Amino acid sequence: MDFSGRVGGGRRGGGSGGHRNVDEFGRERRDRPHQRKPYDRPARGGHRGGHGGRGGAHAGMGPVGPIDEAQEIESRLSSLIVKVGDKNTPTLQNNLEALSVVLEKDCVKHELTVMRTFRQCVLELPWKVTVYSTLAGLLNAKNSETGEKVVALMHAVLRGSLAKGDWGSVKVLMRFFALLVSTNSIAASTLIGMLDTFLAPLAGGSAKVSASNNCYVFIVLSTLLWAGRSLKEHAPAELEQRLELAAKYVQAQAEINQGNTLSTVFHDTPPKGSNTLVHLLDVVRAVAGNDWKVDAIYAPFELFASEFAQAKQHELPALELPTELAATAFYTPSEFLQLVPSPSDQAVRKYVLQDFIADTLTQLEGNRKDCGKCLMQIHNLCNEDVCSVMTAVQHPEDVDPESTLVFEYMMAEVLFSFLLQLPEGLYREMYYTSLAIELRKAEPVILANVFETMVESIVARVQFIDVECLNRLSNWLAVYISNFGFQWDWTKWESAASEPVDSPKHRFVQETLLKLIRLSYLDRVRAMLPDSYSALIPAKAPAHNFKFTVQAMDERTREVSVAVGRCLKSKGTVEQALAILQEHYSKWADIDDDRRQSLAREMLVEHVLLLGSKTFSHMLNAIEKFMPALQKFGDSPEAKLQIAQVTEDFWLGNPQFFAITIDKLINYRVIDPATVIAMLFDDGHVGSWSKFQYWEILHNTVKKVNMRVVQLQGRLEAAVTAANAMADDDTPTEIQPAESVEHVEATLAQMVQEQRDVVVSTARHFARLLSSGSGASGELDRAWLHGRFKEFLRTYRIQVVENASTLESSVFTAEASGDVRQAFEDVRKLSAA
Amino acid sequence: MAPATLFDDSLLTDTFTIVPRLDRPSTYKDHQYQGSTEQWSTDLARTTTLYVGNLSFYTTEEQLYEIFSKAGEIKRIIMGLSRNDKTPCGFCFVEYYTHENALECMKYVNGTKLDDRIVRTDLDPGFKEGRQFGRGRSGGQVRDEYRQEYDEGRGGWGHMRAKQEEDRRIQQEENYEAIASVPAGAELEINGRLGDKHGDM
């Protein structure tokens, strides 16, 4: 084994003279950024090769001292562990053998480093599981004490991940243990015992379909996919029985979700494959039918069978399932959307690779840059002819996705599957955006084409896609385009301009352009568009729509407006402004008090908004300063609604300012969440349900309420703990608890009531509009509204189900239209499942 | 049953990672920060504020709001201003409501582009009055004092370079203004060979 080129990450190509960067045929290697592995970078501060000093443990420890020999060895060791098996090469077998010898020898002296590195390799480099399980097996075969330590450590990490509900790690670790059976480090029965822990809730075969059971069965099937081969050999009956149990559950789960399209991304195809568990079961059965052979990835353990035969198997303590996790804390596996055609006879290999891609995306979420680099490494461990890699061939344009699996397409499909996952993705949308940006930065031409193909393929199905998903794609695309010089081939979508304004394509293109304008400015966006797009973008830059411009009002209104305007401009106080309003309107004898109050309210709000119209900071300052007056004027639900509607009119030409002003008015408690709901579902918006802006505001509002409940629950917990601590403490103390338990409880109860009101009233508005002939201006308008209704139900399914009886008796009654009641039924099933 | 003593307990608690996380503090430091290094770390461990650098002078609060709200609801944005003319000078503070949002911003927004420039964010202990102003001698940021490259989004040349460029321009102007007429050059044929007279090219 040649260690010289593999040690001291970052000094690639340096050192050994005459070592040119050429491939086996003597051709210059193409220098591609993704071929530099994330851990190839030279470490900061000193000459320590590896990465021992980076990240967690040593971060912020100050300057590195003189080069310590032990440190040098340790960083070399960890570098070796990290890099082994990066590629499926003929030398891999030898490398593994040599590395296990070195580690076995040095493990005692450098145990912490070796173990820590090994642990993270399994967790962070999930696609190399065959390599690390083999390495663990070799260590065990050479020295069963070392082997026992490794196995025990990984098992302890698994127990910790289970307790925390870190399902990504649980899945990855279970796969590692599945392969440990192949290396004879644990017995088949030990693995069966581990699987049985996950299957325990299913025992008896009449298990309730639930989020937790979905998650457990997903992990069991994912593990069986890799464990099948060795279990078939050592425990065939047990294997069959576990598979049967899982299959029975999958069937029950599928029956419950039969025809439930509430969280289906594309509605053009029968929802085949959209049930992840069913799809995974199909894959597992296909693998079982092929003698449990998983042949996509190089499996080095097969080469060491004779060594493993002598190894010692280790016993492991029992696993425990978490008992106190909320239903939302369980892993909802993402389906893999088919966006590019692929050979149907390769479905198993495709799943195996996309599963690795998905795990890498999950495990390296903390660093999208390195995640991008790692993703582009995965194919290196593939067996020959499993997939084509466009970024590694001379003529990427000749690669045909219909005749071969194309790695980049598979990767992009996973990325978009995560982005479009319903009811919600694992991470913020922005993760998938900035990850795509990193990937394209490394491969500017090929990945630009890949992502364009993906977007085109989704837009080609635009009339069938879920409304929320279309919204997410639009957000994604705008940020993506703005990161690459605003370059995009707009000519392809020219037809959108001539479609009806609420056709999905027209709306998608228009909303994407509006987002681009928000990220830059109107002229910039206009300059890059063909002339045919002029109807899709505003004629003038976003601006306010101040009502009291001098031309259009009567004399006495003008007088008030001028006086108020002058007062606010010259930094007048709240009292002065109120006095001016009082002085003027009290003279208007021809109208009643209510009317006067309403006019004064409008006048003040218009002027406060104008005062704050320059930037968000100005807006916050204006609202903060006039908060007492605004609150005083917002003394009833109707008054609050008027404030919100004046705000909408004022910012008619600037949806971004509209959304944020509304948001801030809630924060400053000038208006309530209920106000916002009433404003959004105003009949005046019929015909505009396709606009994204209303739903952005709806989400901001509901999420804010939910967030407040969560925060108050946290505060209550803290208050109770503090109170208990006080009670336990005999010594008299001066310190008072920060807040009384009663007070927090009362506030929480109030907030929970508000949360209930928001959910019920929103549902009521949706049901009313969707069930009446006048709730939408046409079929398209109604389709958007219905799409947003489904989005609302599934996003807030917990609150919806909590209030199910109220909703059932007063909202989703027999008068509600059929598809409305169906969606409500679907969401109840979805949350039950 | 594997006893717990098989391996070092720290292996279950250390936060070591092979791939460094992006939501950990960098080498960024506010040079006028008053507390100790430990205090700095404690502040960063719960902060909701980010320092944002490398902005164009023309980038607006609204654009910042659009991109930074991708990581969570924004509490406020404080634009960095030139001390002298109170115009944006290429940095700002973004404050979220939660620490988690600030970390998500570090992971997902830091290093992406806004107005064609790579946005750089760093965890910051929090805004204090006075920090909104540039600390360079010319009112802007210190980095713009010494910058040698032309940067259209940040007012052209760096302040020192701008001064040099201006001096050079003035000197050039003075030198060339004096030339009233274009010299014709001496009519000698020493280099005639190079001309077209002999036509031997």
Image (cartoon, rainbow, N blue to C red):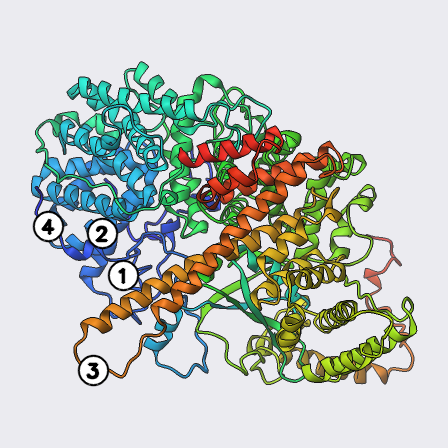
The residue beneath circle 2 is A116
Answer whether labels 1 and 2 touch (C-beta < 8 Å).
yes
> Is B167 in front, or is A236?
A236
Disc 1 residue type (three-letter):
Ala
Name the disc covering residue B4, or none: 4
Name the element at disc 1. loop
| Image quadrant in which you'd find residue A205 | top left
> For the residues carrying marks 1 and 3, which lies nearer the camera in this image?
3
| Image quadrant in which you'd find residue A636 | bottom right
The residue beneath circle 3 is A732
- Which of disc 2 and disc 1 is earlier in sequence? 1
Residue B74 location (% of width, % of height): 55, 63
Disc 3 residue type (three-letter):
Pro
> Is A145 in front, or is A815?
A815
Residue A265 in view (yes/no): no
Disc 4 residue type (three-letter):
Ala
Q: CA distance from mark 3 to mark 2?
A: 47 Å
Q: CA distance from mark 1 to mark 4?
A: 22 Å
Name the element at disc 4. helix
Name the element at disc 3. loop
Q: Chain of mark 2?
A: A
Residue A732 location (% of width, % of height): 20, 82
Q: Residue at x 41, y 27 (%)?
A: A351
Q: CA distance from mark 1 to mark 2?
A: 10 Å
Residue A82 location (% of width, % of height): 29, 46
Q: Residue at x 68, y 40 (%)?
A: A508
Residue B40 in view (yes/no): yes
The residue beneath circle 1 is A57
